[in-house]
């Protein structure tokens, strides 16, 4: 019998799939498995939906390994073997590339993310995975929106269903309705092997996202529906009432 929390997560993932047309019959979906709570939750929710869905789709997982002695994937390999999910590890010297090429004023985490995406996109294209699933949850969507509003002066967030800039890879984010606390609780209850980032740059990056998290927490004390409203607002853009040059 599935735990109530997992049933809730799979229901929300299923709703996102339906609302945004994320999965179609015959899709080959590659989950970017970082080893964190969010990507584990996404992978196992999709596996459950794969079993129950009226359509057929293939599922695999991949980890872009950032460099030697950064983290150990042995536990992940063992667990995915038990789950019968195809799994690949792509070795990459990302940490060294960041060290050698980071320019002043550039976030090492953003630079690392761009490098990972490039490697991931190339692998998916070569192996004929037509969709890449990322583990961004509801809180990520809202925090990204506010980060762009406050620090970049733009109304920009993340899309649940996005054609990448390369014009080939389709990015889906099925956790759009799932709160971060749910992925944390589920991963803890399941005992999956969590692999955190042990990069030497960790802790050196500006804490803007942490500040946004704290701000949202304060706002929720006054407005309990704040996050739900912010997420809904991303789909209710009234262009006539925004600044538009003549």
Image: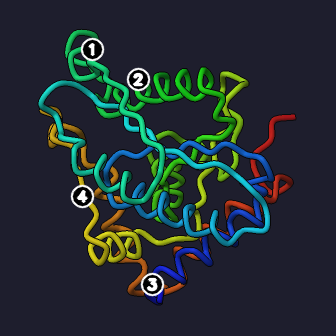
Dot 2 or dot 1: first in sequence order is 1
Residue at x-position 55% and y-position 62%: 47
- Spatial separation of the CA atoms under disc 3 and disc 1: 40 Å
Residue 66 coordinates in the image, percent (x, y) = 27, 28
**Where residue 72 appears, x then y in whole percent?**
18, 41
Residue 175 seen anywhere in this rendered image of the structure? no
Q: Image check: 166 left or right of 196? A: right
Q: Please report whichever mark, 3 or 1, sits nearer to the chain's N-terminal start.
A: 3
Nearer-the-camera pick, 216 or 131:
131
SS class, disc 4: loop
Is residue 227 visible in the rendered structure shown here?
A: yes
Circle 3: is it few (<14), some (14-19), or many (20+) Cα within 10 Å?
some
Q: Position of residue 128 (x, y in %)?
A: 66, 28
Kindly identify which numbered label has been placed on residue 193: 4
Residue where numbered disc 3 is placed: 5
List x then y, in percent, for residue 105.
29, 23
Q: Residue at x 66, y 26 (%)?
A: 165
In the picture as drawn, the residue positioned furthest to the top comes out as 100
Tally the marks. 4
Residue designated by label 1: 97
Assign a secondary structure to mark 3: helix
In the figure, 191 relative to 90: above or below? Answer: below
Query: Which residue is tagged 2?
Result: 115
Colouring method of the image? rainbow
Between marks 4 and 2 in the image, the one whose residue lies nearer the viewer = 4
């Amino acid at each position: 019998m599935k735990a109530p929390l997992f049933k809730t997560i799979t229901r929300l993932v299923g709703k996102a799939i339906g609302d945004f047309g994320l999965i179609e019959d015959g899709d080959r979906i590659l989950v970017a498995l970082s080893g964190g709570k969010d990507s584990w939750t996404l992978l196992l929710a999709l596996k459950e939906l794969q079993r129950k869905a009226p359509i057929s789709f293939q599922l695999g997982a991949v980890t872009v390994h950032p460099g030697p002695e950064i983290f150990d994937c042995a536990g992940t390999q063992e667990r995915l073997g038990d789950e019968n999910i195809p799994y690949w590890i792509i070795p990459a010297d990302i940490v060294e590339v960041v060290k050698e090429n980071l320019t002043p004023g550039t976030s090492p985490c953003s630079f690392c993310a761009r490098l990972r995406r490039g490697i991931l996109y190339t692998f998916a294209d070569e192996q004929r995975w037509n969709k890449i699933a990322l583990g961004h949850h509801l809180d990520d969507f809202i925090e990204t929106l506010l980060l762009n509003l406050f620090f970049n002066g733009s109304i920009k967030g993340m899309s649940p269903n996005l054609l990448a800039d390369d014009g080939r890879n389709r990015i889906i984010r099925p956790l759009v309705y799932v709160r971060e606390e749910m992925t944390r609780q589920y991963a803890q209850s399941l005992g999956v092997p969590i692999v955190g980032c042990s990069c030497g740059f960790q802790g050196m990056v500006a804490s803007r996202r942490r500040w946004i998290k704290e701000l949202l927490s304060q706002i929720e004390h006054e407005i309990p529906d704040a996050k739900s409203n912010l997420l809904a607002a991303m789909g209710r853009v009234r262009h006539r009432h925004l600044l538009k040059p003549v």
